[in-house]
Image: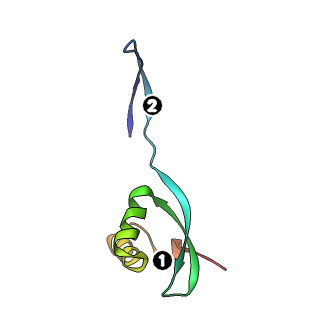
Amino acid sequence: MVGNNVSHSKRRTKRTFDVNLFTKKFYYVEEDCWISLNISANGLRVINKVGLDAALKNAVAKGYCDWKNIRVIG
């Protein structure tokens, strides 16, 4: 998304709004392994609310991610 930085003197310069993504490790109980996900802050709230397994199944069903993109650690 693109917008403007607006200074005190109302001068406008272009800027971009980036997605709040970061890499996080989760323990996946159903598979008994650690996984690494690139996830947003809102995605973390969804996982805390419905659980990791339900959130992953919902994301795959909606096409947000694929099981191939989920990286298993160790």
Residue at the image position 50 percent from the left and 85 percent from the top: 29
- Residue lying furthest top: 9
> Is the N terminus in the top left, top right, bottom left or bottom right quadrant?
top left
Residue at the image position 55 percent from the left and 64 percent from the top: 24
Q: Position of residue 3 (x, y in %)?
A: 37, 32
For disc 2, the marked residue is 15
Residue at the image position 56 percent from the left and 75 percent from the top: 35
Q: Position of residue 46 (x, y in %)?
A: 36, 66
Q: Is residue 29 above or below residue 11?
A: below
Q: Position of residue 67 (x, y in %)?
A: 48, 77
Q: Nearer the viewer, residue 39 or 49?
A: 49
In the image, 50: left or right of 73?
left
Q: Earlier in the sequence, mark 2 or mark 1?
A: 2
In the image, 16: left or right of 26?
left
Going by the numbered disc 2, the residue's amino acid type is: Arg
For disc 1, the marked residue is 67
Residues marked 2 and 1 touching at CB (< 8 Å):
no
Going by the numbered disc 1, the residue's amino acid type is: Trp
- Which image quadrant for residue 52? bottom left
In the image, 40: left or right of 32?
left
- Residue lying furthest front: 48
SS for tag 2?
Answer: strand
